[in-house]
Structures are given as structure tokens and as C-alpha cells.
Amino acid sequence: MENQKKLPKQEFSPERRLPKPSFLERVIEFFRCRVNKRNIIIIVVMLAVIAGAIGLRMTILKPAPKQIYQVAVMVRSQVNKDKSEDLRVSLKKGDVLVVQDADHKFSKMELVSYLILKMKLNKEQAAKLIQADIRPRLYFIDLSKRDFAKFQANDLLKGQPFQDKVYGWEIVDKKK
């Protein structure tokens, strides 16, 4: 003890502060304190599942390609006196009569009898438009909503009113 020199006490000086850790160093320290091996395995497994789901979505489950179709929509309801027969065979206002390719030419009679709409659909959606259940059609286009609210069947005598617009599946409703 005698050989030891007494060193002067170092006092803390405000000018001599330790450097503040950077944001990244604080984040690393936060995770170092809280993450153990089990948590790391869980995080890696979750990331692998998410990456697999994204890969599956992009390869196998990619949405079907869409194309432009022309659909002929009933503007008047067919009526049968027998109620059960009416439900079974009569097309109603808004039901799609036929789905055709974009370049199909409708006859003059069809152009004044049916509302012809351009729709961008995939093949499954196009098939659903003419799908039947107990009724002749399971799906319909509600002609009392959206752009069609002011449309009247007699408007077809002046020409097809909605030829400038391409609609999507959003205008289709399922019958109850």
C-alpha cells in the first residue's frame, strides 16, 4: 500500500460526457435485451410464411386476366301469370341476357330492345352473369342505381346511352 501513489480523484466534468448512442445502436440494444432464441425462431418462421404466401399469390393464385365484354341487359321484366313459372323462367329487369366479346355486332332489334354495356370481367365473372339457380339468373345489374338511375327503356330508341364507359363487377348484385 505504501508503494501505491495516491492518484488524484477524477471529477466528472460536464464537458467530458460520453457520446450518445445513435438511434440504430439504441434499437439494437433494445432487441438484444428482449430477444431470445425462441423469439428469433418465431420471427424467422413468420417471415418465411409471409414470403411463401406472397410467392403463392403471385404464381398460383394470380387473378384471372380480364377482358372487355359486351352484355345485353333486360330493360323490361318478363311476366308469366303462373307465379312459380314466372320465378322459374322469366327474365327480370336488370338480368343479363347474353355476354358477348367486345367486337360482337348486335342487330338493330337488339340495340333498341336491350341495354348493351361494356364490362371488364374475367371468364368466371362473365359466366356468373348468366348463371341460373331456381331463377333464370342468379346475378343482376340494378338499373335503379349509379349511372342507370335516370335510364328509361324508351331511351334506347335514341341509341345506346352508356357506350362510352366500361364497367366492372362493382355494378353487379346477387339476387336474394
Image (cartoon, rainbow, N blue to C red):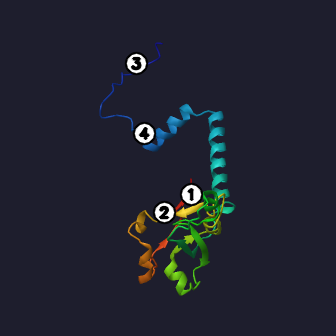
| Residue 33 appearing in the image | yes
> Which image quadrant is residue 42 in?
top right
The mark found on residue 142 in the picture is 2
Going by the picture, which residue comes out furthest to the left?
14
Q: Residue at x 60, y 58 (%)?
A: 83
Viewer-proximal residue among 26 and 48: 48
Seen in the picture, residue 83 relative to 42 is either above or below; the reply is: below
Q: Nearer the viewer, mark 3 or mark 2?
A: 2
Name which residue type carries label 1. Lys
Tell me if mark 3 has few (under 14), some (14-19) or many (20+) residues whose alpha carbon lies within 10 angstroms of its own: few
Residue occupied by mark 3: 6
Q: Are marks 4 and 2 in contact (CB under 8 Å)?
A: no
Residue occupied by mark 4: 21
Of the image marks 4 and 3, the number of the one nearer the N terminus = 3
Of the image marks 3 and 2, the number of the one nearer the N terminus = 3
Q: Nearer the viewer, mark 3 or mark 1?
A: 1
Of the image marks 4 and 1, the number of the one nearer the N terminus = 4
Q: Are marks 4 and 3 in contact (CB under 8 Å)?
A: no
Query: What element does badge 2 sit on?
Result: loop
Image spot of residue 56 (x, y percent): 67, 57
Name which residue type carries label 2. Asp
Image spot of residue 146 (x, y percent): 42, 64
Of the image marks 1 and 2, the number of the one nearer the N terminus = 2
Query: What element does badge 4 sit on?
Result: loop
Q: Are marks 1 and 2 in contact (CB under 8 Å)?
A: no
In the image, taking residue 37 as reference, residue 75 lies left or right, namely left
Query: What element does badge 1 sit on?
Result: strand
